[in-house]
Image: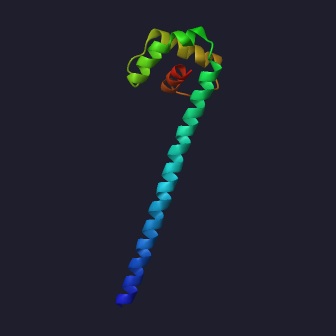
């Protein structure tokens, strides 16, 4: 009887360790994918708006917006965000990602 319990306990521990490892791998893959997607969007935005005077003028407002996690929204940033969305309506980035892209160029 003790041998059966020992075998069952060993099987349970092995299954638990495997499930935990699989869960960890899936979580890190999902987080890594989200970071790469965000990075790609930021890179695409910044490269397409490199020479835009309206966007360049919004750098200070974008810095304040990013530093405050969206709490400070200056008028030049608002104008630049509207302009970017008109120029590239296919972008699905939120305001924070667009502000980061303005700073990244």
The front one of 39 and 15 is 39
Furthest-front residue in this view: 105
Q: Is residue 39 above or below residue 76?
A: below
Q: Is residue 34 visible?
A: yes
> x, y percentage for residue 4?
40, 87
Q: Which image quadrant: the N terminus?
A: bottom left
Furthest-left residue in this view: 2
Which residue occupies 47% across, 61% down? Answer: 21
Which residue occupies 43% across, 12% down? Answer: 74
Q: Is residue 32 above or below residue 70?
A: below
Color theme of the render: rainbow
Instruction: Count the numbered circles shown.
Output: 0
State which quadrant residue 72 falls in: top left
> x, y percentage for residue 63?
44, 18
Which residue occupies 53% across, 49% down? Answer: 29
Q: Is residue 2 above or below residue 29?
A: below
Would you say 12 lies left or right of 85 here?
left
State which quadrant residue 17 falls in: bottom left
> x, y percentage for residue 45?
60, 24
Q: Which image quadrant: the C terminus?
A: top right
Would you say 71 lies left or right of 24 here?
left
> x, y percentage for residue 83?
58, 13
The front one of 97 and 51 is 51
Q: Is residue 91 visible?
A: no
Which residue occupies 48% across, 57% down? Answer: 23
């Amino acid at each position: 009887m003790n041998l059966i319990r020992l075998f069952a306990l060993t099987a349970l521990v092995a299954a638990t360790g495997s499930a935990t490892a699989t869960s960890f791998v899936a979580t890190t893959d999902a987080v890594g994918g989200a970071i790469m997607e965000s990075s790609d969007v930021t890179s695409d935005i910044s490269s397409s708006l490199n020479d835009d005077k309206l966007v360049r003028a919004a750098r200070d407002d974008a810095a304040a917006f990013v530093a405050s996690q969206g709490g400070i929204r200056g008028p030049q940033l608002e104008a630049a965000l509207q302009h970017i969305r008109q120029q590239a309506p296919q972008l699905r980035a939120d305001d924070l990602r667009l502000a980061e892209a303005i700073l990244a160029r």
